[in-house]
Image (spheres, rainbow, N blue to C red):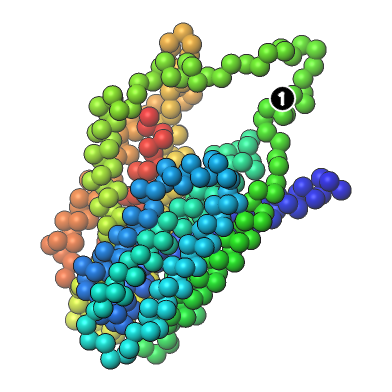
Amino acid sequence: MSLLFSRFRLTLVCISIAANSLVAGGVFVFPVLSPAFAHILKLSQPQLTTVSLAGITGQYPFSPIVGKILDLYGPSRCSIIAAGLFFVAFVWSSSLLAMTPPDTSYPSPWSFRCLTVAFFMAGLGTVFSYFSSIFAASKNFPLHPGAAAGTSMALFGLSPLCLSVIATNWFTEAVSGQLRIVSYLRFLALLTTLTHLFGAFVLDSSKPSTASSLESAQADETTSLLPALPDAVSFSRSHLNPIQDYYFWILAFFTLCSIGASEMVISNMGTIVLSLTSDPLSAINIPSDVVTANQVKILSISNTLSRLVVGPLADFVSPVASYLPTGATIYPRKHRISRVVFLTLPTSLLCMVFLWMEIGAKSRRAVWVLRYVKLFQLFHILLGFIF
């Protein structure tokens, strides 16, 4: 009976992890929302860019702080914090839109500032949700932490796709193609709050056996009474401080120029589409909301595929070296190419994409190249492999 109940709790944990990952990407559907923000609030393109950057600012700079909170209080508390942040952010945004008079002809500074703070909170909630899902997945599957975390990250990559599909199919006018943004934001507030509150009750409930408990369970009269020393000492002796390694700063420069530029494009996809005219040769004028929704869907798919493919591919063609106590270096398989190729090749392709957008993109039809710019965000998957 206890085994059956333990499996039932683990099933609830898996459902909660998957649900948290799939609904946590609300801040990444900003390209779908930006046309409605520009139409209702009369926000300019620099203002829309500022709101989008607020969502990014709420994520990356606060990741170490969120990680410390996660270590102290666990994924359940982080899920509660994410629920509160998402609820306030989306309800606040929908209220700003609902209270805006329909005859507004110029942007309100107060609405712009409030919307910026709201998306900052949504970005911060994304970090709490993302970290709690990965931590809970790794904790509940201690024998397969890489597969558990990778699955959570893949589902998180699908979040913009799921949320944009919901926006397109259930919250978009059939005739005009306009997004009912107030109803959609309220739906996001309800969905994310209930999902993360469910996670608050189940993410800390499972107590799986760890590797040490399995070893102790298999102990016999030949088992040593003293535990084996960890490998941290040998690891620290064989690796330099990253700050003192100039290769680290080369990698940081690559990251700044590639991932930063890609994040800028992805966050401003809606404003990029609005800045271009419709195809003059096409007889059908596709609404901007539909165009941006399609962009978000394809970006989400390419992001998920890159997470699933790049890691195993890098392990196969460029395995990580193992260092023996004697100082020898061994490879589990033949080392075919350097992992630097995974940086230089996508960066070169990214430069070609930006060059095309400068000389070839004259209408919304030509913006299809940017759909695959999300593939060039795969660098962060390789950061842990390179060093």
* Relative side of 207 to 231, left or right: right
Residue at the right extreme of this rendering:
1
User: Which quarter shows the C terminus?
Assistant: top left
Q: Please tell me which residue lies in front, 248 or 360.
A: 248
In this picture, residue 380 sits left or right of residue 211? left
**Direction from residue 362 to residue 65 in the image, left or right:** right
Instruction: Residue at 42% x, 79% y: name it.
Output: 95
Residue 109 in sight from this viewpoint: yes
- The percent coordinates of residue 108 (x first, y second) are 26, 78
Which residue is under mark 1?
215
Residue at screen point 18% across, 59% down: 356
Q: Tell me which residue sits at (49%, 24%) in the image.
A: 332
Amino acid type, label 1: Glu
The answer to whether 78 is drawn above or below residue 94 in the figure is: above
**Figure disc tally:** 1
Nearer to the camera, 181 or 327 = 181
Image coords of residue 176 (percent x, y)? 36, 88
Instruction: Give the residue furthest to the front.
Output: 110
Q: Report which quarter residue 319 is drawn in.
A: top left
Residue at 22%, 70% in the rendered image? 45
Q: Can I make out residue 372 in this image?
A: no
Residue 386 vs 375, above or below: the answer is above
Looking at the image, which residue sits at the far left?
A: 359
Q: Residue 207 is drawn in which quadrant? A: top right
Q: Position of residue 256 (x, y in %)?
A: 25, 44
Position of residue 311 measured from the top left corner of the image (x, y, whole percent): 44, 41
Q: Is residue 291 above or below residue 332?
A: below
Badge 1, how many Cα within 10 Å: few under 14, some, many 20+? few
Identify the element where label 1 is drawn: helix
